[in-house]
């Protein structure tokens, strides 16, 4: 059943038409992803659907009694309210239904048990059930905990960072359990684990409909029943998630190309006929002329430029980065404890962990070591400002050239024009300097856009400009902090294609699971208490290894509580001869499995696996071998722990 419908809605700002004649129906429980290039009007369309903004024409209808909740990219919260009070506002409808039911119940207890009052009590109870059930008082703490707000629950929202305020606004929408959620970039400022929880909550727990604007292609693939693309003012609807959208869009574009080719052929034929005809023409000729004029007036679909990313990469040798005994602190809190990390040419590591774990600080510590002595940075404590310090050795190869992309794009001078910002950084090819105007056109900055000041650029334009400067550096080690922020899906795809064939090395902090799965050869995971663990393979291999480890830990935790095997007498303590023999050799087997994994990881780091035109099955097979070795190590380790426990007198 339809819960929300937009019919022929249109919106323009001055002469710029964002969309016209756009129609969309949303059914109960449906999940609809909305994507499109930056500046096409996705956020505006979401605001129109939510009733926050009024369309210039057309209608938006909501089913009677249905509730719509909206998450804006820049939410507005009462700065004086605490996080708890702000999130509780999402429960207003439920709290009102509970108050109404409680009032009616008190009237009945006082003897006012008329049919009308009893009917009112039933109606209030039904409303409570519709709004999520009777026990929702704990929802605020539960959702706030999943979104990383437990420690901030009593703080005023005015004292929070922008990312924290956005999570508060998301929690407020989620606890309300509306009939329709309209979410504008819901995964922004969330770490990978939190995004995974949000994805599962929306897919498995929330019963209403969801319309979400996003560039998170992994979320689209996992959640969307339909994908809607806003392209040049028109809405195009595709069944399925991101992969299905890509396939269907390619078919649509191919059809548009054939249509334009047929139009051109028709025009050539008709124009030749017109040139041959005398001036006096009959009715049939007039109709044919009109058809030719109409075909001539029909403008073809305008080609949209594609970002073209490429970079010259300086030779770095084999050794890229050698980190030994690194400790990173934020005041008294230890973020990184004793990290040892070696990177060689072609290593591309994704960095994952909760917000505030120290991922960005790690990149900054590496960057701070660049001006120091190559091959062995000082080991004394060094400051990064804002109470952040690090100590340990950070060595860089002699020929390593580092480029850094920060989250805030702070390296861009707002007073400069786009052209001036990049002109001194453009690369040289064959000892000849590239024309900066031509270079910027590859990043979709035309002549007019090149004259704009940086401070006047949109978020997406700033992101593209930052990439242009970064790739002009000829660096062979890229440190990227949330590079996918503000990039549309087409630019992201081009960026990933570039990274997949990049001949240098890479450390990328990102929550974009799709990007991690396409370009990384390993994952560096911040796991709390200063522990940072390196995993082989891309995101899916990492997720599988983490799930396997959690399963093993659960088995070990549950082992003492399991009932003994069915027997009248428990087995005697200690090991049998076969078990003792197994224990004597198990450490050698673990070591051998670890050596096998190291060999496969080195093979996985071979840049030729990811070069343009390389067989993707080779990389897939290598990752599978890494997964097999990792699973074997985990299995042997669990068996070793069980045998040791039995030898000590516990259960095997």
Image (cartoon, rainbow, N blue to C red):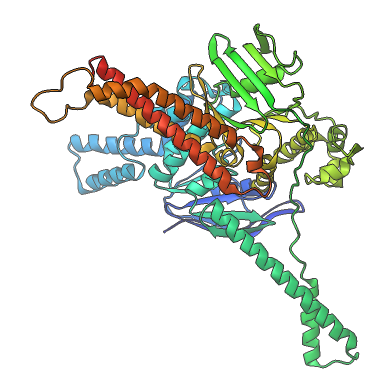
- Name the residue: 18% across, 27% down: 563
For this rendering, which residue is in front, 173 or 604? Answer: 604
* Residue 586 picture location, percent across and down: 36, 24
For this rendering, which residue is in front, 213 or 615? Answer: 615
Residue 178, quarter of picture: top left
Task: Mark yes or no: residue 138 visible.
Answer: no
Query: What is the count of numbered marks?
Result: 0
Instruction: Give the side of residue 547 with respect to residue 217, left or right.
Output: left
* Residue 211 picture location, percent across and down: 52, 49
- Name the residue: 87% across, 43% down: 437
For this rendering, which residue is in front, 110 or 507? Answer: 507
Quadrant location of the N terminus in the rendered image: bottom left
- Does residue 114 lie above or below 421 as drawn? below
- Name the residue: 20% across, 40% down: 112
* Residue 229 picture location, percent across and down: 61, 54
Quadrant location of the C terminus in the rendered image: top left
Query: Hey, which residue is sitting farthest left in the picture?
Result: 568
Residue 350, quarter of picture: top right
For this rendering, which residue is in front, 43 or 312? Answer: 312
Instruction: Give the side of residue 622 with respect to residue 360, left or right.
Output: left
Task: Mark yes or no: residue 260 visible.
Answer: yes
Instruction: Give the side of residue 563 with respect to residue 233, left or right.
Output: left
* Residue 93 picture location, percent across and down: 40, 39
- Does residue 154 lie above or below 26 as drawn? above
- Name the residue: 65% across, 23% down: 363
Instruction: Give the side of residue 236 with respect to residue 240, left or right.
Output: right
């Amino acid at each position: 059943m339809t819960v929300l419908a937009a019919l022929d809605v249109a919106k323009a700002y001055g002469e710029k038409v964002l969309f016209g004649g756009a129609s969309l129906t949303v059914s109960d429980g449906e999940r609809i992803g909305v994507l499109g290039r930056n500046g096409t009007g996705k956020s505006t369309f979401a605001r129109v659907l939510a009733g926050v903004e009024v369309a210039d024409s057309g209608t938006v209808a909501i089913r009677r009694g249905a509730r719509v909740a909206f998450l804006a990219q820049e939410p507005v919260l009462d700065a004086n309210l605490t996080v708890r009070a702000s999130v509780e506002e999402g429960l207003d409808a439920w709290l009102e239904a509970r108050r109404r039911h409680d009032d009616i119940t008190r009237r009945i207890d006082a003897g006012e048990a008329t049919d009308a009052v009893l009917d009112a009590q039933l109606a209030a109870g039904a409303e409570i059930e519709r709004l999520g059930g009777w026990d929702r008082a704990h929802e605020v703490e539960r959702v706030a905990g999943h979104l990383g707000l437990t420690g901030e629950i009593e703080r005023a929202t005015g004292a929070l960072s922008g990312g924290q305020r956005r999570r508060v606004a998301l929690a407020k929408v989620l606890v309300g359990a509306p009939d329709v959620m309209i979410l504008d970039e819901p995964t922004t400022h969330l770490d990978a684990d939190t995004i995974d929880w949000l994805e599962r909550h929306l897919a498995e727990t929330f019963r209403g409909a969801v319309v979400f604007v996003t560039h998170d292609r992994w979320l689209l693939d996992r959640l969307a029943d339909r994908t809607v693309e806003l392209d040049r003012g028109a809405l195009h609807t595709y069944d399925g998630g991101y992969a299905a959208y890509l396939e269907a869009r390619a078919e649509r574009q191919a059809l548009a190309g054939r249509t334009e080719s047929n139009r051109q052929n028709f025009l050539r034929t008709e124009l030749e006929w017109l040139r041959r005809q005398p001036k006096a023409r009959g009715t049939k000729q007039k109709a044919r002329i009109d058809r030719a004029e109409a075909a001539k007036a029909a403008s073809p679909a305008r080609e949209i430029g594609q970002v073209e990313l490429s970079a010259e990469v300086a030779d770095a040798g084999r050794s890229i980065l050698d980190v030994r005994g690194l400790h990173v602190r934020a005041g008294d809190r230890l973020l990184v404890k004793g990290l040892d990390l070696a990177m060689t040419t072609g290593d591309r590591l994704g960095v994952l962990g909760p917000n505030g774990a120290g991922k960005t600080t790690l990149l900054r510590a590496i960057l701070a070591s660049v001006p120091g002595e190559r091959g062995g940075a000082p080991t004394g404590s060094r400051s990064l400002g804002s109470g952040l310090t690090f100590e340990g050795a950070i060595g860089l190869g002699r020929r390593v050239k580092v480029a850094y992309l920060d989250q805030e794009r702070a390296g861009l001078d707002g007073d400069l024009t786009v052209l001036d910002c990049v002109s001194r950084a453009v690369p040289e090819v064959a000892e000849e300097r590239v024309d900066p105007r031509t270079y910027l056109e590859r990043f979709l900055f035309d002549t007019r856009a090149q004259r704009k000041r940086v401070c006047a650029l949109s978020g997406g334009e700033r992101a593209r400009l930052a990439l242009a400067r970064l790739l002009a550096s000829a660096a062979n080690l890229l440190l990227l902090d949330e590079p996918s922020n503000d990039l549309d899906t087409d630019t992201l795809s081009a960026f990933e294609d570039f990274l997949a064939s990049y001949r240098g090395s890479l450390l990328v902090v990102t929550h974009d699971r799709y990007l991690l799965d396409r370009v990384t050869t390993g994952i560096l995971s911040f796991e709390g208490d200063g522990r940072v663990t390196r995993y082989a393979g891309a995101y899916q291999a990492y997720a599988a290894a983490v799930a396997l480890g959690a399963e093993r830990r659960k088995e070990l935790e549950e082992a003492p509580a399991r009932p003994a095997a069915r027997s009248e007498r428990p087995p005697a303590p200690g090991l049998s001869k076969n078990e003792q023999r197994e224990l004597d050799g198990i450490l050698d087997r673990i070591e051998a499995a670890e050596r096998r994994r190291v060999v496969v990881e080195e093979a996985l780091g071979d840049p030729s696996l990811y070069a343009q035109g390389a067989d993707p099955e080779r990389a897939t097979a290598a990752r599978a071998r890494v997964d097999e070795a990792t699973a074997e190590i985990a299995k042997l380790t669990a068996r070793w722990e069980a045998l040791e426990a039995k030898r000590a007198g516990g259960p095997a």
